[in-house]
Every structure is written in C-alpha cells, then in structure tokens.
Image (cartoon, grey):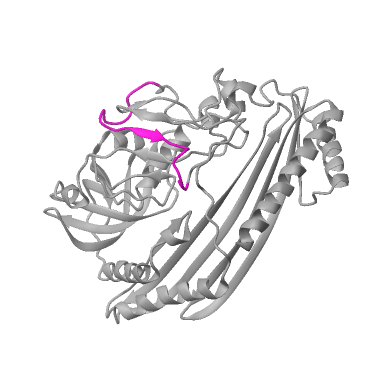
Amino acid sequence: MQLIREIEKEELFLFNTAKETLELSKRKNTSIEVSIKKTIGISVNIRNGIIENIEFNNDSVLFITVYNKFSKGCVSSKDFSTNSIKNMLETAINISKYSSSDFFSGLPDIKLLCLHSVELDLFHPWEFNIEHAINLSILSEKEAFDFDKRIVNSEGSFFNSHVTINVFGNSLGMLETYKSTRYSTYNCMIAQDKNSMQRDFDYSISRKIDDLEKPEILGQSSARRAISRLGSRKIQTMKSPVIFSSEISHMFFSHLVHAISGDNVYQKSTFLINDLKSKIFPDWLNIEENPHLRQGLGSKPFDNEGVFTENKYIIQNGILQTWLLNTYNARKLRLESTGNCGGIYNWLVSNSNISFEELLQKVDQGILITELMGQGVDIISGNYSRGAVGFWIEKGKISYPINEITISGNLRNMWNNIVSISTDIDKRNNIQCGSVLLSEMQISGN
C-alpha cells in the first residue's frame, strides 16, 4: 500500500528529526525532552444528501522542553529544519533563564522511562478514498430517512479517518515512536410528529475501518433513537432510582478521573483528598486500567513524558488504590509517577454479570438517563447537578420518554448508591462500562 510506505517514510524522518534535536542539545548541557506529533486525515460532512464540506489535514508540530537548574522553557514549531531546531533550543534555554525555579520540575526518573515500546496493534491504515467516505455518509443518512416517515431532517452524517505518528525522546536516552489509526462515523437525525420535534444521534469509532458499524445499521439506529424521544413528557419532582445508560455511563465515572488527578490532589482541591486506600464504591466494584489493550482506543505504550504505562487497579473491591500522577505532581506528593501524564488509558469497569433487561427489572419506578447536559459538577465538594433526558421506567419496563429534568446529588453518595452494573458495555470511550443503576437520586421536574 502506498499510504503505508509514505507513513513509514514520514515516521523515519520524524524519528531522525528528534534524534538530531537530542544530538544538538548535548552541546547546550541542559536536560531536554522532545516530542513530535503528526496527524494525517480526511473528514467528510454530508447533510440531506449534499456534501457540506470535505477536509484534508496534514499537520505536524515539534515540541522542545528544556530544564535548566529546575527552570523550564518550552517552545514549539512546524519548521523541522536544522537551523530552526537550533533556534528553538536557544529560545527554550533563554526562556528558562527568565522562568522561576521549581525544585519539582525536571525529567522523570530514568527507571520509569519506556525504553522499549510495546506493540499494541494500533495501526491499521486505509487508503484515503474520498468517494468511499462520501458514499458511507450518504448511505447512513439515507437509511435513516427510509426507516420511518417521521424522520424529517438531518443534522449531518460524518466520516473521519486519521493516522497519527508520535515520537518522543529525552536526554536520558529514551527515543521511541509509535503510530495509530482512528476511524469514526456519526449520524444525527430529526424526528417529528404532530406535537413535537426531537433529535438524536449514534456513532461508531474504531482503530480498523472494517470494525466500524455498517452505515445501514448506524442510520437505522440514529433514526430509531430520534423517534423514541417523540412524545416526551415532564415528570414531577421526586426521589427515585436512576439508570445511567451504557452510552453515557463513562461520564459518570469520568468525575473520578478529575477527583484523583495529581494536580487536584496536591492542591487539595478534591473531595477525595483523604480517601486514598479508603472504600468509596461498593465492595464488589473494580476499575482496572489497561493501557496495553490491543487496538484499544485508549491504549498507549508510554505517557506524554515518556513514562511507561502498565496495568493497575484504580478501584479494587471498592477501595481507591492510587492517584493519577505525572512527574511534577508526584514529586509534590513525594510519590512516583503513575504514567498518567496526558490522561487515562482504557478503564475497565466491572459489572454484576446481568443483562440490561435484568437491570431494568430491578426498577419498579424510576428513570433511564440517555443524555446529560451542563457541567454542574464540583470536584471540591463532590456536589453534582446536571440536566438530563431519558425514559420513565414502570415495573421494570421502559414506559415513555421524559425531558426537562435535572438530576442532583453528591458523588460520594452516588458512588456508594450503585446497586448494579449490566453487561451492555460501551467500548467507544476510554472508560468502558455497562449501564449503571443507582438506588436513589433527586429528580427535579415540574
């Protein structure tokens, strides 16, 4: 394949550029890290069968960070010539001279570096074919319109294909590279009846283009979801059980990411500041981080500082096992980096080994949340309040759609109130989880 040859050629060029940068830095007698990221891809946007836009991107950037006696200087450039690199090094050093000294700044401990990358099967290139991408988007939208006469309009059908090359090195002897692909399709439709108009969407994302949801199925799914929301009702203010559907349950656990991030911990700006090694979830619940999941959407051999990534429990038997640390905040806390500079990698949330239908049957009266709105989460206090839409559950079955509600509580109580998690795991996010049933939340309606 021509694309593979071009990418491999580009990867070698970027590798040699990073190597040259490290060689030039040896004359400056400073600690340095160099990072290069290149993204190549296409995006297609269709609406009502008409091409709205087609985008090509071919972007690359070189980042240089120097540490000069605990002072830091950072520069970036899209010019990879030798003269540009020399100028970048001089500029970074000059910046560091005018930066305040911070004892906790510096390169990671050499024993934590990823000196040999793990093969994670992330690279599955597809020859960019605009005509094929357009046809996929048109077919997805057409299937949605053909599904039901109540589908009256489209908010768009999208296709994206991107290749990313990452190169990272530092003056401690690390110089590693890896490449990855990512494909995604998205379809959003509008349904209408005599009394209302509703929209909903569906999407698919994968490392391999052949693993994307077929456009016919995606179109039908987005249409079905939009129609299911017609006739939405308001409900009274109450307390009731709540199910976060698997498509949004990752958001429910994403607040844990912020609450245990090293920056928030050392700044004492998290409600979990005293909860390391304490029970914050039911004792049957585990969350494992697996950065080396083959073809995983959140898989990486090393973090943004070159620290190796490894499997670890975030939550084990309900107990918080670790903070999420980079080199700087780890030193602030007198701990070691956990390899989480840049985020998390494939959180796998355990379940109760029951189906979604069995989860529904545990609810006599309550709500199923399928979409959340707003950002009403305070990590310092744990207080939670967000707008939501979904469905009313009656005697273990979905009864009718509801909207214009607000759900509220406190994350500490919400996590402890988890009754069960079903096996309908959504694998389209860094946090992979089934639908989550909470025993009770405050629902604000009419």
**Residue 65 within the segment the image draws in magenta:** no
Image quadrant where residue 316 sits: top left
Looking at the image, is 216 positioned above or below residue 268? below
Q: Nearer the viewer, residue 233 or 171?
A: 171
Residue beneath the point at 29% across and 53% down = 369
| Horizontal and vertical percent position of residue 47 | 48, 77
Residue beneath the point at 41% across and 73% down = 140
Q: Nearer the viewer, residue 392 or 329?
A: 329
Most distant residue in the top direction: 334
**Residue 283 within the segment the image draws in magenta:** yes
Can I make out residue 274 in this image?
Answer: yes
* Quadrant of the snapshot with the C terminus: bottom left
Residue beneath the point at 75% across and 39% down = 64
Q: Nearer the viewer, residue 235 or 114?
A: 114
Q: Which residues are magenta?
A: 277-297
Lateral position of residue 335 relative to residue 57, left or right: left
- Count the marks: how many? 0
Can I make out residue 379 in this image?
Answer: no
Q: Nearer the viewer, residue 296 or 66?
A: 296
* Quadrant of the snapshot with the N terminus: bottom right
| Horizontal and vertical percent position of residue 18 | 74, 41
| Horizontal and vertical percent position of residue 247 | 35, 53
Most distant residue in the front direction: 1
Looking at the image, is 401 positioned above or below residue 291? below
Secondary structure, magenta segment, majority class: loop
| Horizontal and vertical percent position of residue 46 | 50, 75
